């Protein structure tokens, strides 16, 4: 469980300067504050929960006592008592994937502007971990949840519906979702990338990615296949077990070992990390030149894409706009509205050196054995 928050949520006392040296910090209670300040326990409670009904002089005396003994109010308990929360939960499938890390940062920025903090959790593509995180969020009484579900069944949504928890889903899910969803249009992104490759004259194409059971990956492949068919270009799948740099490198190394004649002349990778790993393997081998013999396009336009040794062409996802929409949809539900449907954000293709136009196409099919 990763915690990303500007404010403390449910903390124990951190430090103290108490006259009773035998009292552990963790056992400090409102009673200790009341004794130190010379007021009743109910007055301390009012200072914490409803300070507007307490005289300013008394508030100052109670807060001074809190500082002196190191007492920190338990925000989670306070929220449970009042039935309110200023925290939202966010579950992603793989925080090591730069897209999710960048999206989480954008969500925190937009949430903070609305006075909300964010608890971030990583399911690591495990339905069990996802369920555990959602149960934890329920225990913490978070105000709402942003969820990138594992798989296509959306089984994780059932408990949220039952609890009445406001939620927003990341991704292009199946019809009939009980919550609104926000997503980059992955089908359009696949189309856009392959349309560029075919405009360069590339006809032996490959889609690098997996697992294909994940909707974003299968949707990108769907869009790529549609345009390849229209252009009468061949498209094969180079499957990967995940979307990491290492998997891209593995596939690239296996292809180079088979010889240049087995190389495609255009590749769309499902993520930028896959593309960068793939290019690294080809660069080490040195038998195939990019982009003259092989044009490569990644997906996500992470910061590494523009700054790599060979700048990577990529399909850009508007993280800030997606994050802003997700937070707004949660806020709408907090206000009693019932937003539904799917918000799709259009893709943008960023052309860089790995798929630059105007380069002569060099044939690899007759190189090697």
Image (tube, helix red, strand yellow):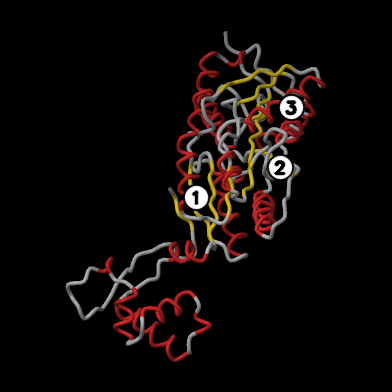
Q: Please tell me whether mark 1 sits on a helix, a strand or a loop.
A: helix
Q: What distance separates the C-alpha of mark 3 from that of mark 2? A: 20 Å
Residue extending farthest left: 22
Question: What residue is rendered at 66% in x and 58% in y?
Answer: 331
The residue under label 3 is: 360
Foreground disc of the pair 3, 2: 2
Horizontal side of residue 332 vs 82, given as left or right: right
**Residue for badge 1:** 138
Residue 197 seen by the camera: yes
Q: Which residue is mark 2?
A: 350
Q: Helix, strand, or loop for circle 3?
A: loop
Q: Quadrant of residue 11?
A: bottom left
Question: Whole-percent x and y of residue 282?
Answer: 55, 26
User: Is 68 rendered above or below residue 126?
Assistant: below
Of mark 1 and mark 2, the one earlier in the sequence is: 1
Of the two numbered discs 1 and 3 on the same chain, state the one appearing first in sequence: 1
- C-alpha distance separating marks 1 and 2: 41 Å
At a point 68% along the width and 37% down the height, the residue shown is 172
Q: CA distance from mark 1 to mark 3?
A: 58 Å
**Crowding near the residue tagged with mark 2, few <14, some 14–19, many ≥20 C-alpha atoms within 10 Å:** some
Give the percent coordinates (x, y) of residue 248: 53, 28
In front of the other: label 1 or label 3? 1
For the residue carrying disc 3, how many other residues have a C-alpha within 10 Å: few (<14), some (14-19), or many (20+)? few
Residue at 19% x, 78% y is: 20
- Asked whether 161 or 169 is in front, the reply is 161
**In this view, 146 is above or below 108:** above
Which residue is the extreme one toward the top?
Answer: 369
Viewer-side residue, 229 vs 341: 341
Picture coordinates of residue 156 (x, y %)? 56, 37
Residue 338: numbered disc: none
Q: Residue 198 at what x, y percent from top left?
A: 77, 26
């Amino acid at each position: 469980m990763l915690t990303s928050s500007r404010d403390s949520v449910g903390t124990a006392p951190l430090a103290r300067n108490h006259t009773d040296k035998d009292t552990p910090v963790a056992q400090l209670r409102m009673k200790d504050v009341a004794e130190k300040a010379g007021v009743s326990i109910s007055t301390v409670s009012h200072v914490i929960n409803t300070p507007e009904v307490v005289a300013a002089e008394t508030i100052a005396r109670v807060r001074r006592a809190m500082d002196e003994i190191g007492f920190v109010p338990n925000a989670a308990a306070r929220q449970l008592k009042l039935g309110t929360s200023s925290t939202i939960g966010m579950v992603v499938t793989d925080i090591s994937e730069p897209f999710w890390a960048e999206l989480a940062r954008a969500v925190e920025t937009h949430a903070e502007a609305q006075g909300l903090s964010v608890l971030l959790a990583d399911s690591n593509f495990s339905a069990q971990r996802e369920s555990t995180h959602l149960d934890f969020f329920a225990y913490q009484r978070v105000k709402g949840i942003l969820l990138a579900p594992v798989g296509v069944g959306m089984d994780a949504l059932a408990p949220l519906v039952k609890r009445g928890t406001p939620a927003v889903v990341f991704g292009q899910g199946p019809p009939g979702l009980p919550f609104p969803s926000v997503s980059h249009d992955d089908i359009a992104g696949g189309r856009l990338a392959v349309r560029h490759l075919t405009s360069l004259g590339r006809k032996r194409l490959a889609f690098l990615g997996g697992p294909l059971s994940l909707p974003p990956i299968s949707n990108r492949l769907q869009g790529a296949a549609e345009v390849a068919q229209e252009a009468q270009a061949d498209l094969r799948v180079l499957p990967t077990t995940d979307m990491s740099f290492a998997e891209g490198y593995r596939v690239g190394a296996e292809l180079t070992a088979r010889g240049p004649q087995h190389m495609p002349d255009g590749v769309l990778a499902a993520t930028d990390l896959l593309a960068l790993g793939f290019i690294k393997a080809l660069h080490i081998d040195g038998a195939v030149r990019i982009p003259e013999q092989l044009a490569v396009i990644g997906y996500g336009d992470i910061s590494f894409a523009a700054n790599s040794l060979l700048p990577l062409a990529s399909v850009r996802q508007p993280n800030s706009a997606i994050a802003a929409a997700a937070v707004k949809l949660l806020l709408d539900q907090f206000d009693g509205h019932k937003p539904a449907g799917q918000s799709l954000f259009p893709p943008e293709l960023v052309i860089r050196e790995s798929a630059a136009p105007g380069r002569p196409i060099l044939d690899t099919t007759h190189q090697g054995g």
